[in-house]
């Protein structure tokens, strides 16, 4: 938008609810679509207040953008880079149609600080290990890369939009969700409120971030995903706050850039393991175990509470994403891609690069991944990161009265203790679907069959 306004005296703003994406969603009840719809409504009002407007379309973007560009008689179309394979193919199709009409297609970097080949090894190759990437990222960072792009001073160049109202959520084929009840703030105004609130506690991020019952994270991930928060503004807070918590949070933002870079250079990760030798892993195909994991019926309280949080709210704490992903792949022996797809359907902040990177890290199939022989123990993870069981009790009411000494492994209660706690294993709460110790042995055997010496150019 900044680039267009600087060059052109009349700039039309457009947002497309892409039917190619929306029609593929499994249901018409999707918090992400409602979040986007509310954010687009706020954006449209903000543009109108500046003397401009917003064309809001519901169509296939690859066709609608060239058609609107021809109708408006524009000389150029501006958009931001997208790194997902499907989006790259879409943008190439749009570019080709625009070229046929003699219209330029200009794209810019926006959703990351550094993209693609901006951060490389000393030999000019992409990194595949995070720590040296992070060091090179930090060495390259200068104030310029965090600067805002002030569009307000060019507001006079905004063209007014159509007078007709934007399509309703229902017209898009979707209904209201529990987004409002969850108090998830939408739009740029919502992102700024969260950023301001987090800035007051960023110093404690390092010590709180792993405990799901604490208010540790920024909760900005959905805003970074959909562009209602500027990565430059967010990173500015992390860089400018001189504390351990801010430094750790900045590392998380660098991980985000890292996974975008990996996807851009290694698009095969969208379907297959980054480490191709792990494409031969013989996963189990236990549909009953997969459904137990999806529905939070594994018998391991921290795993089940995490899945309940995901299913009820569309959010999952980052520590719990690692725990549940490890459990699915290392305890249940199920292909990480099934879990990755389930998260893709459920997460409010679903982003292909980050979701894929996280799952391949947990499954030990990705770059700079968790070594396959390091397997999260769901009981010790629970004891360490939810010691009093506060998070577990919040999402698993059947365990509300289980004594603290048993909250992480309730099957260890005697029959009388189960009765006293109102939690009969196998009736009120599931018995463990697997024995972790035995599952660990099977996992080591499974991965050991595909063991190949590793060499990383990073």
Image (cartoon, rainbow, N blue to C red):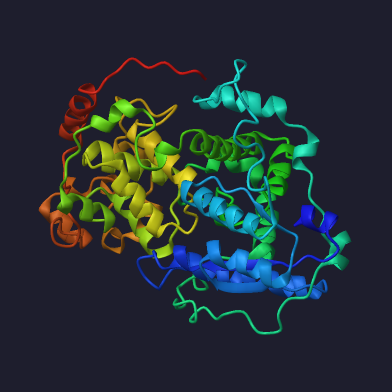
Q: Of 431 and 87, which appears nearest the observer?
A: 87
How far across and how far down the image is residue 146, in percent? 75, 41
Q: Residue furthest left?
A: 415
Q: Of 421 and 68, which appears nearest the observer?
A: 68
Q: Of 38 and 189, which appears nearest the observer?
A: 38
How far across and how far down the image is residue 26, in percent? 35, 66
Left or right: residue 9 versus residue 115 is right
Query: Which quarter of the figure has residue 252?
Result: top right
Task: Please say if 119 is above or below 3.
Answer: above
Left or right: residue 98 versus residue 369 is right
Query: Which quarter of the figure has residue 236?
Result: top right
Q: Of 217 and 335, which appears nearest the observer?
A: 335
How far across and how far down the image is residue 29, in percent? 41, 72
Q: Which residue is drawn at 30% across and 26% down?
A: 277
Q: Residue furthest bottom?
A: 164
Q: Which residue is drawn at 29% across and 35% down?
A: 377
Query: Which quarter of the figure has residue 93?
Result: bottom right
Q: Can residue 402 be seen in this view?
A: no
Left or right: residue 290 versus residue 101 is left
Q: Is residue 262 visible?
A: yes
Q: Which residue is drawn at 66% across and 38% down?
A: 246
């Amino acid at each position: 938008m900044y680039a267009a306004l600087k060059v052109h005296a009349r700039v039309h703003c457009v947002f497309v609810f892409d039917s190619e994406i929306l029609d593929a969603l499994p249901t018409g009840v999707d918090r992400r679509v409602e979040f986007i719809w509310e954010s687009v409504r706020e954006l449209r009002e903000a543009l109108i207040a500046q003397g401009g407007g917003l064309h809001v379309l519901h169509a296939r973007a690859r066709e609608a953008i060239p058609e609107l560009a021809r109708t408006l008689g524009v000389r150029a179309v501006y958009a931001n880079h997208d790194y997902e394979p499907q989006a790259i193919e879409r943008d190439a199709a749009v570019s080709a149609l625009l070229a046929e009409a003699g219209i330029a297609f200009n794209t810019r970097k926006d959703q990351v600080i550094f993209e693609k080949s901006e951060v490389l090894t000393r030999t000019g190759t992409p990194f595949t290990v995070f720590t040296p990437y992070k060091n090179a990222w930090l060495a390259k960072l200068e104030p310029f890369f965090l600067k805002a792009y002030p569009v307000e001073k060019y507001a006079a160049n905004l063209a007014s939009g159509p007078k007709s109202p934007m399509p309703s959520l229902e017209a898009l084929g979707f209904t209201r969700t529990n987004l409002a009840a969850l108090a998830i703030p939408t739009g740029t105004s919502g992102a700024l409120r969260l950023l301001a609130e987090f800035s007051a506690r960023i110093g404690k991020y390092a010590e709180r971030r792993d405990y799901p019952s604490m208010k540790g994270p920024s909760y900005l991930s959905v805003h970074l995903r959909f562009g209602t928060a500027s990565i430059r503004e967010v990173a500015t807070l992390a860089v400018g706050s001189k504390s351990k918590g801010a430094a750790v949070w900045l590392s998380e933002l660098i991980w985000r850039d890292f996974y975008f870079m990996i996807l851009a250079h290694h698009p095969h990760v969208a379907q297959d393991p980054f480490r191709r030798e792990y494409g031969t892993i013989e996963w189990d195909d236990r549909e009953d175990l997969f459904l137990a994991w999806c529905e939070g019926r594994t018998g391991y309280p921290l795993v089940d509470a995490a899945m309940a949080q995901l299913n009820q709210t569309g959010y999952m704490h980052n520590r719990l994403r690692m725990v549940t992903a490890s459990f699915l792949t290392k305890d249940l022996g199920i292909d990480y891609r099934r879990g990755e797809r389930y998260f893709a359907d459920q997460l409010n902040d679903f982003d292909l690069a980050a979701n894929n990177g996280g799952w391949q890290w947990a499954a030990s199939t990705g770059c700079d991944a968790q070594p396959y022989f390091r397997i999260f123990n769901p009981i010790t993870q629970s004891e360490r990161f939810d010691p009093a069981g506060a998070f577990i009790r919040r999402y698993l009411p059947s365990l509300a009265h289980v004594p603290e000494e048993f909250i992480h492994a309730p099957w260890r209660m005697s029959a009388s203790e189960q009765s006293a706690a109102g939690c009969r294993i196998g009736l009120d709460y599931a018995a463990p679907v697997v024995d972790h110790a035995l599952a660990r042995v099977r996992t080591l055997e499974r991965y050991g069959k595909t063991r190949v010496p590793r060499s990383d150019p990073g």
